């Protein structure tokens, strides 16, 4: 308990290991983690893995790896729902005894036919509760047939409402929803049911998840009440879903937006974390570590509108993160032999760490300058006034001053031919930092090569 007598904050992230985490999952995980840290609470990792045909061990491992990559350490778990089947069976018996869980035998084909018939009559395509109308004799004969039933939860009449920590007052009219199937014919529980049992038994105080779960939340509040719990004891927060930069559904691009794909593309975890934490809020999209993000995290600042996930914004933030990243944090991802001086020289011009390889080739490899028509005499003059080594950060300024005195050039007219001859690029890192890395021998060789190709 906290000092004011309220239960200490306990949140959970409960993905299903049926695929890789994508940015939508990551945003939910991050929101839960930041909320827990902001309030001194616990972050529980729980795996919804009761669907044994779709859940895979490799996806479980990937989920844990992705969360660690983002820096989201969990306080408890991973808790696997497949290890808690006895708890679900016990809760199901309680609902059966209370008359809230009832057996059904309709096939998928029969249910589809019923839905179509209701639609033709202008009615909502919800379950008609035909199984509840079965007589005791009909039910006994159904059980005796050997065909196992699946079990539906009988929803209450009326509506259930709550004050959402993101969206404000929300309500679900339960009669407009089909009685949900909680137990499959093979006896395994569905997420809707297992999640409620887990949340109650694990003392979860806040459920933070996507807006697409609002109806599910209403149903689960009703299940909680049927199990004898107070639905108000668990606060709800629903994050608006993410869309693309033009407002398009993100689902069509979700494969390319898996955390694995983003990591392979070179996105830094610090950039993705800062981006997702502030997406849909009035806060600036600026680099920030997790501790800073947690200190300022407030569910009430998240917009009610869908968050626009813009890859260009994420890349711009990635660039800012790299600009402040120390050498030791990237040493193992740089080309062999790359030094701290090299990293400090080039990091301000990188969107992704892998782009450093090009600049390493510029300073330590062999490049062929582009033809510089009409610049041969100027480049030979540049060689003539090139200072002797050793070189340092002041060498470029001294060279420029000598070259300006010899040729009368200045500014862009002075530096553009030199940059092109020495790096092959119009733009790039500060030449003052690059020159000592390239070294006098390479500079002379490249200037002469460029001069020979540009009489």
Image (cartoon, grey):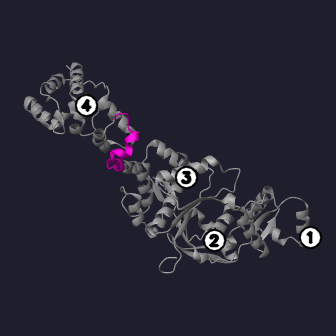
Measured as percent of width and height from the top left, residue 62 is found at: 56, 48
Seen from this angle, which residue lies furthest left? 405
Q: Which residue is mark 3?
A: 64
453 sits left or right of 358 in the view: left
Looking at the rendered structure, the secondary structure element under dot 4 is: helix
User: Which mark sits nearer the N-terminus, 2 or 1?
Assistant: 1
Q: Which residue is mark 2?
A: 200
User: Which mark sits nearer the N-terminus, 3 or 1?
Assistant: 3
Measured as percent of width and height from the top left, residue 359 is found at: 32, 35
Looking at the rendered structure, the secondary structure element under dot 2 is: helix
Circle 1 or circle 4, nearest the eye: 4
Circle 3 or circle 1, nearest the eye: 3
Please tell me how crowded label 4 is: few (under 14), some (14-19), or many (20+) other residues with Cα within 10 Å: many
Q: Are marks 2 and 1 in contact (CB under 8 Å)?
A: no
Q: Which residue is mark 1?
A: 137
Q: How far separated are the C-alphas under marks 3 and 4?
A: 43 Å
The residue segment tinted magenta is: 319-337
Measured as percent of width and height from the top left, residue 121 is found at: 75, 65
Disc assigned to residue 438: 4
Total marks shown come to: 4
Seen from this angle, which residue lies furthest bottom? 5
Q: Are marks 3 and 4 in contact (CB under 8 Å)?
A: no
């Amino acid at each position: 308990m906290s000092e004011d007598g309220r239960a200490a904050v306990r949140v959970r992230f409960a993905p299903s290991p049926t695929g890789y985490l994508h940015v939508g999952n990551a945003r939910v995980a991050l929101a839960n983690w930041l909320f827990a840290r902001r309030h001194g609470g616990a972050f529980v990792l729980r795996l919804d893995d009761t669907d044994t045909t779709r859940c895979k061990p490799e996806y479980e491992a990937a989920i844990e790896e992705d969360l660690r990559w983002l820096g989201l350490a969990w306080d408890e778990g991973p808790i696997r729902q497949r290890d808690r089947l006895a708890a679900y069976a016990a809760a199901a018996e309680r609902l059966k005894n209370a008359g809230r869980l009832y057996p059904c035998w309709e096939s998928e084909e029969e249910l589809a036919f019923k839905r179509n018939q209701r639609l033709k009559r202008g009615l909502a395509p919800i379950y008609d509760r035909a199984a509840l109308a079965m007589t005791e004799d009909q039910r006994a004969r159904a059980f005796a047939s050997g065909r196992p039933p699946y079990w539906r939860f009988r929803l209450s009449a009326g509506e259930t409402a709550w004050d959402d920590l993101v969206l404000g007052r929300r309500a679900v009219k339960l009669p407009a929803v089909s009685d949900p199937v909680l137990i499959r014919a093979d006896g395994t529980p569905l997420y809707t049911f297992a999640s409620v049992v887990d949340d109650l038994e694990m003392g979860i105080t806040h459920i933070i998840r996507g807006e697409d779960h609002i109806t599910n939340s209403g149903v689960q509040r009703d299940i909680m009440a049927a199990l004898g719990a107070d639905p108000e004891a668990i606060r709800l927060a629903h994050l608006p879903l993410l869309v693309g930069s033009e407002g398009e559904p993100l689902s069509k691009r979700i494969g390319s937006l898996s955390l694995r794909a983003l990591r392979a593309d070179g996105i830094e975890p610090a950039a993705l974390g800062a981006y997702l934490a502030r997406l849909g809020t009035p806060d600036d999209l600026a680099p920030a570590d997790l501790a800073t993000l947690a200190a300022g995290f407030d569910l009430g600042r998240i917009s009610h509108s869908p968050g626009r996930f813009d890859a260009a914004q994420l890349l711009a933030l990635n660039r800012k993160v790299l600009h402040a990243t120390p050498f030791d944090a990237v040493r193992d991802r740089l080309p062999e032999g790359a030094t701290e001086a090299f990293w400090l020289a080039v990091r301000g011009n990188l969107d992704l760490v892998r782009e450093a390889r090009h600049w390493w080739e510029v300073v330590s490899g062999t490049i062929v300058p582009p033809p510089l028509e009409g610049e041969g005499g100027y480049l030979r003059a540049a060689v003539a006034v090139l200072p002797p080594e050793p070189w340092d950060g002041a060498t470029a300024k001294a060279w420029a001053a000598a070259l300006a005195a010899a040729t009368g050039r200045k500014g862009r007219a002075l530096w553009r031919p030199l940059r092109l001859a020495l790096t092959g690029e119009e733009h790039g890192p500060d030449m003052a930092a690059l020159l000592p890395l390239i070294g006098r021998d390479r500079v002379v060789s490249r200037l002469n090569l460029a001069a020979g190709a540009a009489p």
